[in-house]
Amino acid sequence: MVGILLVQDIFIFPMLIIVGFLTNKMIDWNTVSLQIIGGIAMITLITWIVIKKKIDISFLKRLGSDHETQLFLSLILCFGIATLAGLLKISPALGAFLGGMLVAAIKETHWVHDNLLPLRTIFIAFFFISIGMLIKPDFIRPYFWQILLLTVSILVTNTLINAIVLKTLGESWRVSFYGGSLLSQIGELSFILTAIGYQTSIFSVVIYNMMNTTIAISFLLSPLWILLTKKIIAKAELHLATISQEKK
């Protein structure tokens, strides 16, 4: 399932380029070229991280147990990749995401994860606060049924698609449907796509708010959807077991 999430994140790069082509404005080929170069570079970086699993950077070894300097360099690395992504006309948030992946893969900075755990909790809290701020009650009221239909359709469709993918990988139907429910919500990087789509005037403020609200609600309803899926799986297994016993 981690692999599926990673592939979803990788596909954000071609999506960003496609969004650029959908705008009504004249296509800026310099921007598109920079995005293609940036996309290829970042996909290459992700592939390298996945293949290497643990990356050995020799000059960090010289720092020995100087964790403060290593932490400083790790932050520079994250902000540096984020800045580079911005210069290549790709979202800096994606660059920071890749910077975090790289820091996690470097052998010499293995301790960073444990030491930054309190900060991670704070950032996760800020992330969900920002998601909550995207949900506007005044907007939901007139579009309640449309948003509900979109959210349920997304959860069901994503569950089925991911369940089929997991089944083709050799998992049981039970594991496949449960895994599909875990992957049912829309990824957090989709907020970047909606923001860029709105900034480039591809869709109106109503569509922008509806997409953001749907994504945010899919996050909030995901735990309930997972619980419901588990109950459906349990009842289905019990029903099949009863049928099997009756046949005997």
Image: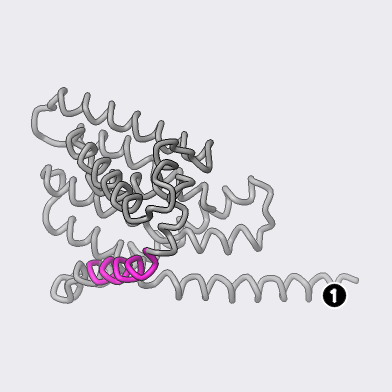
Identified by mark 1, the residue type is Glu
Residue sitting at the far right: 248
Q: Is residue 171 above or below residue 28?
A: below
Residue 86 coordinates in the image, percent (x, y): 19, 39
- Residue drawn at x 32%, y 38% as measured from the top left: 13
Residue 236 coordinates in the image, percent (x, y): 66, 71
Q: Give yes or no for residue 119 being in the magenta stretch.
A: yes
Secondary element at tag 1? helix
In the image, 240 versus 218, the foreground residue is 218
Q: Is residue 6 above or below residue 130?
A: above
Residue 10 coordinates in the image, percent (x, y): 39, 41
Point out the stretch of residues depicted in magenta. Answer: 116-130
Q: Quadrant of the C terminus?
A: bottom right
Disc 1 target residue: 246
Left or right: 86 as drawn, with respect to 116 = left
How dense is the environment of label 1, judged by Cα within 10 Å: few (below 14), some, or many (20 and up)?
few
Left or right: 50 as drawn, with respect to 33 = right
Q: What scheme was used to colour the molecule?
A: one colour
Left or right: 185 as drawn, with respect to 142 = right
- Residue drawn at x 13%, y 27% as measured from the top left: 27
Residue 20 coordinates in the image, percent (x, y): 19, 35
Residue 90 figure quarter: top left
In the image, 168 versus 196, the foreground residue is 196
Q: What type of secondary structure mainly makes up the magenta span?
A: helix
Q: Give yes or no for residue 128 being in the magenta stretch.
A: yes
In the image, 115 versus 156, the foreground residue is 115
